[in-house]
Image (cartoon, rainbow, N blue to C red):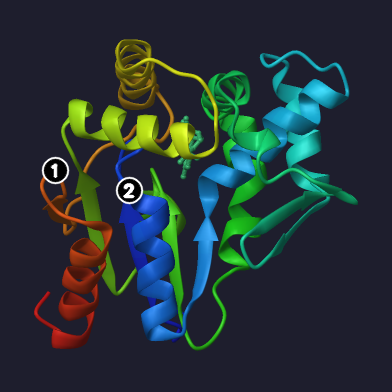
Amino acid sequence: MSAVPVIAIDGPSASGKGTVAQRVAKTLGFHHLDSGALYRLVALGAAREGIDAGDEAKLAAIAVRLPARFEGEEIFLEAERVTDAIRTEENSFAASRVAALPGVRRALLDRQRSFRRPPGLVAEGRDMGSIVFPDAELKVFLTASPEARAERRYKQLKEKGIAATLAALLQDLRERDARDVTRSVAPLKQSPGARPLDTTSMSAEQAAAQIVDWYRGGNR
Ligand code: C5P
């Protein structure tokens, strides 16, 4: 077992994992892994190379050699800044298809584990506590109602000047949840030993403070 502590935060899309994980990492001075970004990068890399989002062998090959770099909050694919390009609705859809392929998931395992460096790691995704870091010190399952999540996504897009409707976002979230929950490999589910945290009526600050408290308090 590695001595480097991991806090695993899993949950559905737009549950606030990203913001909360970043805050927890900052408070504790830990590294941060946004595992969803890796699936998004594979999907974007594939689209750029004209590879179909169902071609498992070619996608796994992309995942192995993924020329990605994380610099603070910016993400690069080779020399190109793709921080926003990986988050379009089109690429989100492609990422969730790519993430259902066992070959891609296997190809990304070592890369995800390589983020575990002293003094610690906050890892967010769908299978952080169940598969990638089963020995995590603290496992949290973050949820919020679909309506609250759609509302948060709506606000984010509006701030970026991207047009969207609440109804369409809600439908999209429900479809993505269904795919994440029902897929045969690494489906989204609360792993045994994970603490549920419902953030429907909580701010990101409150959710992050709760996780830091759990971690520091050893009350887990
Ligand atoms: O978290 P985010 O929405 O950025 O993830 C993008 C896609 O990657 C999701 O649709 C999900 O299916 C997939 N994913 C995954 N396992 C993870 C993280 C993300 O399957 N650990």
The residue that disc 1 covers is 200
Regarding residue 173, the answer to whether it shows in the image is: yes
Q: Viewed as shown, does residue 77 lie left or right of 131?
A: right
Task: Looking at the picture, tell me which residue is in the foreground, 14 or 159.
Answer: 159
Regarding residue 134, the answer to whether it shows in the image is: no
Amino acid residing under circle 2: Gly
Q: For numbered disc 2, what is the local secondary structure? A: loop
Task: Looking at the picture, tell me which residue is in the foreground, 219 or 83.
Answer: 83
The residue that disc 2 covers is 16
The residue shown at (20%, 56%) is 203
Q: Position of residue 82 (x, y in %)?
A: 74, 43
Mark 2 or 1, nearer chain start: 2
* Position above or below: 65 against 2: above
Q: Which mark is residue 22?
A: none
Q: Position of residue 76 (x, y in %)?
A: 78, 51
The residue shown at (40%, 23%) is 184
Amino acid residing under circle 1: Thr
